[in-house]
Amino acid sequence: MWPCIQLALAINSLNHAPLRILFVSAADWAFQIHRLSLAKWLVEQGHKVAVICPPGEVTSELEKAGLKIFSMPLSRERISATEILASSKGIWKAVKEFEADILHCVSLRCILLGWIATRSQANPPRIVNHVIGMGSIFSEEPTSLKMHGIRKVMDWSLKRAFRKPGTITVFQNQDDKDWWSKQAKLRSEQVTCIAGSIDWKNDFHPEPGGPNRILYVGRMLRDKGISELIDAWSQLRAMGSTAQLYMCGAVDPGNPNSYTQPEIEELAREQGFNWLGRRDDVSQQMAEAHMVVLPTYREGFPKVILEAGMSQRAVVATDVPGCREIVEDQKTGLLVKAGDVETLSEAIGSFLDDPSLRKRLAQNLYERVQSEFSDSAVNPQWQDLYARIAK
């Protein structure tokens, strides 16, 4: 590390008293992918960090990173009053045992659990409500009376969680911040925006030879635009393209919009694309691809675009919240209308036909992600926020 950067970090650390920060996460693997880098950085700055989450396959990795782990009985597959109550009690028990100064609740579900856990307690910690996306409950209209009822209950509860004294709500994009500020009548000092970030590595690989490869990375959800991507790719193949389509990501039984594994396997056989399932070598998949496509309906702050930027791969994404925070159309990628197969096909086709275009936009994305969305740029914003609310 450059000496000047080391000095700046040392001065920044001296300006912040050590804090005890407890994260609430709905899954250990989600914390590993999206928050572990921040947690490790906070430990390096002298803070104590813990996580409460359901036990899983990567819990031991979190412990090895120097984090204290608490367990809660939360399931992604169902909503259970018994689990909600038990998890909320577990959160408060962890708060007291860890002596947390900050309770950082990641996702709408965990925000609700944190609110239930602390709403009637004396001397609760300062709370960070971290909205990482709108979730299927709010990103689409309810299709049943049950879902309508669940949305009303969540809306009522979240408004109160956001307005709770000693709380600040952090959004990843301006669209979500504006929507909830209006919906919950939040004051400017109750909300802020902090972008998602990536642990920056020099991960550039020249484009490979052979047939063009189109890569999708994400969960196998209908609202990620998977159907539209398959149709757009099929149109290109019908016009003579030899480009291959690879999909990298797992099904999610806890999400109502998820394909099942048999459904994806059948689609792959019928349509001829390659489904890789969940992979831990995303950077390698990027290296073997010529472009990354994310035809999603809505995002919080998609890490896959940051990964594409770090790998210098061109991106086609939809012009929706989250994506347009990172991708500037015709500058750092191509944006298309969500749900529009024709424009999606045209955008992918333009990258297939013009290697110089995709390389130029990929380079621009690389530079933007490194300067604005690397951990070194974003992590200090979290430390500053914790210090400000802990006073």
Image: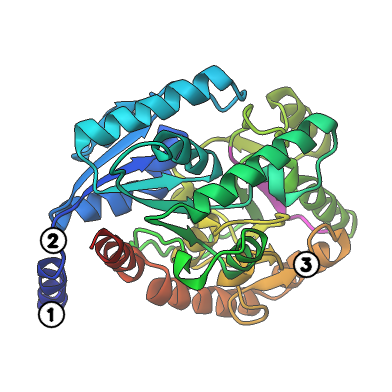
Residue at (85% x, 33% y) in the render: 144
Relative image position of residue 93 (x, y in whole percent): 29, 28
Residue 171 magenta-drawn? no
Residue at (67% x, 65% y) in the render: 316
Q: CA distance from mark 2 to mark 1?
A: 22 Å
Query: The residue tagged with tag 1: helix, strand or loop?
Result: helix
Residue at (54% x, 61% y) in the render: 305
Q: Using a 10 Å C-alpha cutoff, classify the residue at mark 3 as few (fewer than 14 neighbours), some (14 to 19) or many (20 or more).
A: some
Q: Would you name the residue on which mark 1 appears?
A: 4
Indicate the amino acid at tag 1.
Cys
In the rendered structure, find residue 17 and report the number of the disc placed on it.
2
Residue 48 vs residue 387, the one in the foreground: 387
Relative image position of residue 127 (x, y in whole percent): 37, 50
In the rendered structure, find residue 349 and report the number of the disc placed on it.
3
Q: Which residues are magenta?
A: 241-249
Relative image position of residue 218 (x, y in whole percent): 60, 46
